[in-house]
């Protein structure tokens, strides 16, 4: 029987061989160590994520919230979730549906389209800062700077705080060799972020504006006939900021790396930029940054003959599902022409990622503009660094070198 520990060094180093064995040998896998189930096949995760009667998200969805580990629980207890308010990431339907409907107009396809010109303007500005030197870090110099600013624009946060936000958001997912959860530094910086957001929201409520942003939408909403508290508004703004800032740069840098590994496919895109949309979607499937999110079992549920009992954690191994041969032919082949009808990168069901359309627009624009100035870039692999985290897999830095355009 396969042993699977998502916090082990072997899984941190390369989880995909473990995922393959789980899919083949134990697709509904129980860990006695963590009192948690791991689902690894695409069809199972797609279906179970939409069963809101059997699972709840109120106890958290992050791995460190669902793995019954005394050390992790002690870290979690040090953060009073009740004091931080409730975001849609911690609500079950129907309350989740009510609050999500307030934010949804800011993330729908037409909203993403409306943001495209501003995104391209930002992206070209960043490129102008490093294009002449023929080298950049596609995360720190490019993708992260873009994603945090678009998150600020959508939510209504000040752009001049963007770099300060990045430092605190990044700290949430940094681990060293001794960390399996929040480090002391991360907890300090995250605490600073939440304190700043709460103060900003309180002040913004005192001095209202007519800005068409998500903060005003939250202020003006009345789910169940009652306004949201400042803490609840702050919690949802924090979710938009963190979600909008952290994941996209990892996906984008993975795409830059895969196209470098597949120069024939990169050349196709340079020749025909209309392929960028499909190429970035394949990147999202192939190198999904978020390895797993989950739920807690609410009522006894049987999945593939296994009985999941109330109170147990369930982690949906999205990255495994996106490499499931039962869903994707030759799943470990990177192919910009694949055009898979569905992927699990943004989840499924009521909690499907709210920012999916905006993220795909950002990724497309950044890739179009990068290839326009650096069509034959080289990845400096000896200088690339990886994030170490039980949540994400991807680069924390990816330098590239290219011939500056004349």
Image (tube, rainbow, N blue to C red):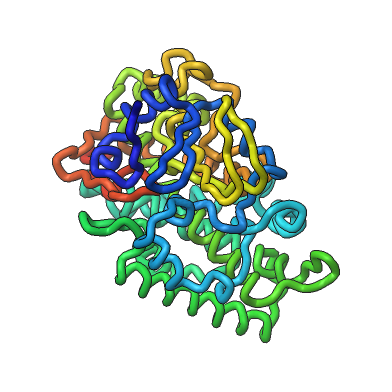
Above or below for 280 versus 211: above
Position of 113 compared to 250: left or right? Answer: right
Please indicate, yes or no, whether residue 252 appears anywhere in the rendered image: yes
Q: Position of residue 83 (x, y in %)?
A: 56, 76
Outermost residue, left side: 382
In the image shown, does 89 or 132 lie closer to the viewer? 89
Left or right for 95, reference 44? right
Residue at 43 percent of width and 73 percent of height: 78
Question: Percent position (x, y) of residue 7?
Answer: 32, 47
**Most distant residue in the top direction:** 329
Q: Residue at x 26, y 34 (%)?
A: 377
Camera-side residue: 397 or 266?
Answer: 397
Q: Find the residue positioned furthest to the right.
A: 225
For residue 9, what is the image quadrant? top left
Position of residue 91 measured from the top left corner of the image (x, y, whole percent): 66, 57
Q: Quadrant of residue 320?
A: top left
Nearer to the camera, 176 or 202: 176
Q: Is residue 368 visible?
A: no
Q: Position of residue 348 (x, y in %)?
A: 62, 37
- What residue appears at the point 42 percent right and 49 percent down from the top-left corner? 124
Which image quadrant: the N terminus? top left
Rendered view: 204 above or below 158: below
Count of all numbered marks drawn on residues in the image: 0
User: Could you say which is closer to the camera, residue 392 or residue 26?
Assistant: 26
Q: Residue at x 73, y 52 (%)?
A: 93
Position of the C terminus by quadrant: top left
């Amino acid at each position: 029987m396969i042993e699977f520990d998502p916090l082990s060094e072997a899984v941190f180093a390369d989880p995909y061989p473990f995922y393959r064995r789980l899919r083949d040998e134990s697709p509904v896998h129980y860990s006695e160590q963590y009192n948690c189930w791991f689902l690894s096949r695409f069809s199972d995760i797609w279906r179970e994520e939409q069963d809101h009667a059997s699972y709840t998200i109120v106890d958290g969805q992050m791995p460190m919230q669902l793995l019954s580990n005394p050390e992790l629980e002690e870290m979690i207890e040090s953060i009073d979730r009740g004091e931080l308010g409730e975001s849609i990431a911690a609500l079950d339907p129907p309350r989740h549906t009510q609050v999500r409907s307030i934010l949804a107009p800011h993330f729908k396809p037409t909203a993403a389209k409306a943001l495209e010109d501003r995104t391209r303007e930002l992206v070209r500005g960043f490129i102008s800062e490093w294009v002449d030197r023929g080298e950049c870090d596609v995360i720190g110099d490019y993708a992260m700077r873009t994603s945090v600013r678009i998150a600020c624009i959508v939510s209504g946060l000040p752009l001049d705080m963007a770099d300060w936000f990045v430092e605190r958001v990044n700290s949430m997912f940094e681990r060293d060799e001794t960390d399996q959860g929040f480090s002391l530094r991360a907890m300090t910086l995250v605490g600073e972020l939440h304190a700043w957001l709460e103060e900003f929201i309180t002040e913004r409520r005192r001095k209202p504006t007519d800005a068409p942003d998500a903060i005003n939408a939250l202020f003006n909403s009345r789910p169940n006939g009652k306004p949201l508290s400042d803490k609840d508004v702050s919690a949802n703004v924090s979710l938009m900021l963190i979600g909008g800032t952290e994941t996209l740069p990892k996906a984008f840098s993975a795409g830059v790396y895969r196209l470098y590994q597949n120069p024939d496919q990169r050349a196709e895109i340079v020749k025909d930029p209309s392929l960028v949309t499909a190429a970035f979607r394949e990147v999202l499937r192939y190198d999904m940054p978020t390895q797993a999110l989950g739920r807690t079992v609410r009522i006894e549920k049987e999945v593939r003959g296994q009985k999941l009992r109330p109170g147990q954690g369930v982690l949906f191994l999205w990255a495994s599902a996106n490499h499931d041969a039962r869903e994707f032919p030759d799943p470990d082949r990177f192919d910009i022409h694949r055009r898979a009808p569905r992927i699990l990168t943004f989840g499924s069901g009521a909690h499907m990622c709210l920012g999916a359309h905006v993220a795909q627009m950002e990724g497309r624009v950044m890739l179009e503009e990068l290839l326009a100035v650096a069509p034959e870039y080289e990845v400096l692999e000896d200088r690339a660094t990886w994030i170490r985290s039980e949540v994400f897999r991807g680069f924390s830095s990816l330098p590239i070198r290219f011939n500056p355009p004349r």
